[in-house]
């Protein structure tokens, strides 16, 4: 069993659709794949059907855009194996999507006013499967270079970072509420890439809220991060996960399966998948 538990598609800010994404996973020898689009469970049922066609087990997933309410610091929470209806998750995340939709439209309109060569209809076409415009869709219309190119990084910084004209961000949800929503839908709540966002200081508080695990294997994690995560996992009895955080052309030069869930924890996702499999068959 080879499991990549952190993958995005064009239902959020990835460049490939569900079928293409699953095909890439199969080609790379991945047997279990978690679709973890930002703040939405849209398309998970379709992914499960397509996964069965291609011989890949799809683990229901999500990556919730959360924060520490007091400091405002961003913290991402991954959710796995939740009830497919995801009623509590949707109730929490749907307003995030609405705020992102409004903010992205404001960003595009501002860029048009500033005489950037950008067409709203073309941006919306790129985002047709998500229904929500992301920064990656905007950048793809502004510059032909990809995410890893220096020209791309410079333009992205000029527009969206620091004092950039479009640097206004949306309001995220409480990290505690994110964990609770996932748990309320009978899912597993996991802290995403703490090394990338430097979110270690919040682990104890998240554990008290019901956190189940920490993402260990991630492209941005160093050996020091691995050591820290192992210590926290041992201290609080947390499971460990891992994944590529694949965004296709809209992300880092990493492929599905390059990072994977530690094999000693794969059984947890197998067991939880069996528990939800009956519910899946009833809904489909």
Image: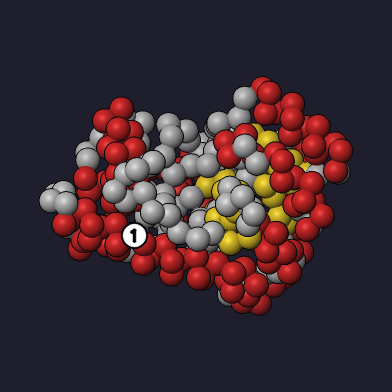
Residue 101 placement: quadrant: bottom left
Q: Report whether 205 appears left or right of 255.
A: right
Task: Answer whether residue 98 is visible to the viewer in this image.
Answer: yes
State the residue at coordinates (43%, 66%): 99
Give coordinates of residue 134: x percent, y percent. 37, 55
Display coloring:
secondary structure
Give coordinates of residue 85: x percent, y percent. 62, 74
**190 to 232, vertically: above or below:** below
Q: Nearer the viewer, residue 117 or 279?
A: 117
**Residue placed under numbered mark 1 in the picture:** 104
State the residue at coordinates (74%, 26%): 227
**63 to 202, vertically: above or below:** below
Looking at the rendered image, the quarter that the C terminus falls into is bottom right
State the residue at coordinates (85%, 36%): 234
Q: Nearer the viewer, residue 275 or 119?
A: 119
Give the class, few, some or many, for how many residues have Cα within 10 Å of label 1's Cα (few <14, many ≥20). Answer: many
Q: Which residue is at the far bottom? A: 282
Give coordinates of residue 175: x percent, y percent. 65, 56
Task: Answer whether residue 1 is visible to the viewer in this image.
Answer: no
Residue 152 placement: quadrant: top left
Q: Report whether 146 appears left or right of 144.
A: right
Q: Secondary structure at mark 1?
A: helix
State the residue at coordinates (67%, 47%): 191
Q: Report whether 104 appears left or right of 7.
A: left
Looking at the rendered image, the quarter that the N terminus falls into is top right
**197 to 125, vertically: above or below:** above
Give coordinates of residue 167: x percent, y percent. 36, 49
Q: Nearer the viewer, residue 165 or 30?
A: 165
């Amino acid at each position: 069993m080879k499991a990549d538990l952190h993958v995005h598609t064009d239902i959020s800010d990835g460049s490939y659709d569900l079928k293409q994404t699953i095909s890439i996973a199969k080609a790379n020898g991945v047997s279990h794949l978690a679709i973890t689009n930002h703040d939405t469970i849209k398309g998970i049922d379709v992914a499960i059907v397509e996964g069965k066609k291609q011989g890949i087990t799809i683990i229901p997933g999500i990556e919730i855009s959360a924060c520490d309410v007091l400091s405002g610091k961003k913290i991402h929470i991954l959710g796995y194996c939740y009830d497919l209806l995801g009623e509590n998750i949707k109730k929490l995340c749907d307003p995030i999507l609405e705020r992102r939709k409004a903010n992205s439209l404001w960003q595009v309109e501002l860029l048009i006013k500033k005489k950037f060569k950008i067409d709203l209809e073309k941006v919306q076409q790129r985002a047709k499967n998500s229904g929500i415009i992301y920064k990656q869709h905007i950048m793809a219309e502004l510059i032909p270079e990809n995410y890893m190119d220096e020209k791309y990084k410079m333009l992205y910084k000029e527009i969206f970072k620091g004092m950039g004209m479009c640097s206004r961000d949306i309001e995220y949800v409480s990290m505690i509420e994110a964990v609770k929503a996932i748990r309320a839908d009978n899912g597993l709540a996991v802290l995403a890439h703490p090394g990338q966002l430097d979110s270690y200081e919040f682990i104890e508080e998240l554990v008290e809220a019901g956190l189940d695990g920490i993402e260990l294997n991630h492209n941005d994690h160093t050996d020091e991060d691995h050591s820290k995560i192992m210590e926290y996992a041992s201290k609080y009895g947390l499971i460990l996960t891992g994944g590529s955080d694949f965004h296709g052309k809209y992300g880092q030069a990493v492929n599905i399966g390059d990072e994977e869930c530690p094999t000693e924890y794969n059984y947890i996702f197998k067991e939880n998948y069996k528990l939800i499999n009956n519910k899946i068959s009833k809904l489909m």
